Image (cartoon, grey):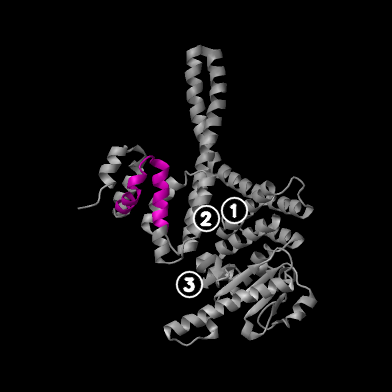
């Protein structure tokens, strides 16, 4: 059972990290026997800084690639099965060339990367696989050039930042140390946030889908993931405190004095004023701090979203900025889901337009209910507004009735 959980994690992990720089297909079928490729990647967008941040994984993704991750060391039969999938793809490409009357070139064939925690010398030697230390680091063994295949022994890779995103797919201590090294990244780093979300999902599946007697290795993995989430929560709380404390204290003192004076006057003179001030200050401080912390949390989410959009699309369009403030009020769960949805968009003009539409739909659904029938037309009309009108409309959105929304956005323009 746990093997399938880890397989699903590996596929989702590679999909999330590689989608900004190309097309990722999970479970691509080949041949009439329907043999399924785990991850088929086709590069489409050149983002040098993003590829560099992926380190060794980014280098592997510089060309069309097939990734076959294994939770446990693959045996000869499993490696032959992977090679069979690659040869099936080669057959498809050759048949396509004949249909289109074009010349087939081996450069079109994907590179197959077989990822496994360890690989014995006997296994590597049985495929005549050899390292290429001039161009690649230790732990990677290449089969003959025409086979375009490499066996990656993750536990043999040097433990450097360049290999971090592959070592997370390792096992035991190697994987746990890689997870711990995520803490060195900034708390608002998009890759860190994506990895944390997927690791949390893995942790949840391990706890929910395995028997009560969890294997020691899985229990250690669960324990390795937990500190990162505590660290993320603490960082958010600390930033919220720093940004909200001053405002909270100011509001608390003001509200406390007002309530204290009011209660003191009602209860009359000395005793009433003394007790009223004390209680009013206490309640006012508490309420002010709560409001200040909430505003700090919202400001943090706004900054995270703004930085995330800049990293992904290079710059913010004017219409993107319109939706930053209302989205900052989302709950942590809603906010994380939105970030993940944006992370799966292509990094081009089409992806930028889809991101704006996704932001608009999210704000709409937060403020409007029971108007699903006009959603598509409403988004078209809403995003056609000039920026100034769009800004004003978004501010008014929570206060508009269903009738007003239908009248203003639900109709096809004449």
- Residue wearing tag 2: 340
| Majority secondary structure of magenta residues | helix
Residue at the left extreme? 414
From the top left corner, tell me how far across and down residue 267 is, in percent. 51, 12
- Residue wearing tag 3: 44
Category of crowding for the residue at label 2, using alpha-carbon neighbours closer than 10 angstroms: few (below 14), some (14–19), many (at least 20): some
Q: Residue at x 26, y 45 (%)?
A: 408
Let me know if residue 369 is in the magenta part: yes
Examine the image and state in which quarter residue 354 appears.
bottom left
Query: Of callouts 3 and 2, which one flags the residue occurring earlier in the amino acid sequence?
Result: 3
Q: What stretch is highlighted in magenta?
A: 355-382
Front in this rendered view, residue 67 or 159: 67
Q: In this view, does 258 lie above or below 178?
A: above
Query: Of callouts 2 and 1, which one flags the residue occurring earlier in the amino acid sequence?
Result: 1
Describe residue 184's horizontal placement relative to residue 326 as left or right: right
The answer for how far apart the CA atoms under marks 3 and 2 are is 20 Å
Q: In this view, does 112 lie above or below 311?
A: below
Front in this rendered view, residue 48 or 413: 413
SS category of the residue bearing label 1: helix
Describe residue 378's horizontal placement relative to residue 114 as left or right: left
| Residue 167 in view in this figure | yes
Q: Is residue 273 above or below residue 64?
A: above
Category of crowding for the residue at label 3, using alpha-carbon neighbours closer than 10 angstroms: few (below 14), some (14–19), many (at least 20): some
From the top left corner, tell me how far across and down residue 271 is, in percent. 56, 13
From the top left corner, tell me how far across and down residue 242 is, in percent. 57, 44
Q: In this view, does 240 lie above or below 269?
A: below
**Tag 3–tag 1 contact (CB < 8 Å):** no
The answer for how far apart the CA atoms under marks 3 and 1 are is 25 Å
Residue at the front extreme? 32
Describe residue 399's horizontal placement relative to residue 66 as left or right: left
């Amino acid at each position: 059972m746990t093997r399938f959980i880890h397989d699903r994690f590996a596929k989702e992990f590679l999909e999330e990290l590689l989608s900004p720089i190309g097309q990722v297909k999970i479970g691509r079928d080949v041949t009439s026997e329907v043999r399924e490729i785990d991850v088929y990647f086709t590069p489409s967008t050149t983002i040098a800084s993003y590829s560099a941040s992926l380190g060794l994984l980014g280098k592997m993704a510089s060309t069309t690639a097939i990734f076959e991750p294994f939770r446990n060391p693959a045996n000869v039969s499993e490696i032959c099965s992977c090679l069979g999938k690659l040869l099936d793809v080669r057959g498809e490409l050759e048949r396509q060339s004949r249909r289109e009357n074009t010349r087939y070139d081996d450069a079109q064939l994907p590179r197959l990367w077989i990822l496994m925690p360890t690989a014995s010398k006997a296994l590597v030697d049985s495929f005549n696989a050899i390292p290429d230390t001039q161009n690649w680091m230790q732990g990677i063994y290449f089969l003959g050039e025409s086979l375009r295949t490499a066996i990656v022994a993750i536990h043999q890779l040097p433990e450097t930042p360049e290999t971090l995103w592959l070592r997370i797919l390792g096992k035991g201590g190697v994987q746990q140390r890689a997870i711990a090294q995520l803490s060195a990244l900034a708390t608002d780093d998009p890759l860190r946030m994506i990895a944390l979300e997927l690791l949390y999902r893995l942790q949840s599946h391990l706890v929910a889908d395995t028997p009560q007697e969890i294997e020691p290795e899985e229990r250690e993995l669960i324990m390795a993931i937990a500190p990162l989430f505590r660290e993320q929560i603490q960082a958010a709380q600390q930033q919220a405190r720093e940004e909200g404390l001053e405002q909270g204290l100011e509001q608390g003192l003001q509200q406390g004095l007002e309530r204290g004076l009011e209660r003191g006057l009602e209860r009359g003179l000395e005793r009433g004023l003394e007790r009223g001030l004390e209680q009013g200050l206490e309640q006012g401080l508490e309420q002010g701090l709560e409001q200040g912390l909430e505003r700090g949390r919202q400001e943090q989410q706004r900054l995270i979203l703004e930085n995330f959009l800049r990293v992904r699309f290079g710059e913010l369009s004017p219409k993107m900025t319109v939706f930053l403030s209302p989205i900052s009020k989302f709950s942590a769960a809603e906010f994380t889901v939105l970030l993940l949805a944006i992370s799966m968009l292509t990094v081009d003009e089409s992806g930028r337009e889809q991101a704006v539409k996704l932001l608009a739909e999210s704000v709409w659904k937060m403020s409007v209910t029971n108007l699903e029938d006009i959603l598509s037309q409403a988004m078209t009309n809403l995003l056609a507004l000039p920026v100034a009108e769009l800004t004003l409309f978004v501010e008014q959105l929570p206060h508009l009735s269903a009738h007003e929304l239908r009248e203003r956005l639900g109709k096809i323009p004449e």
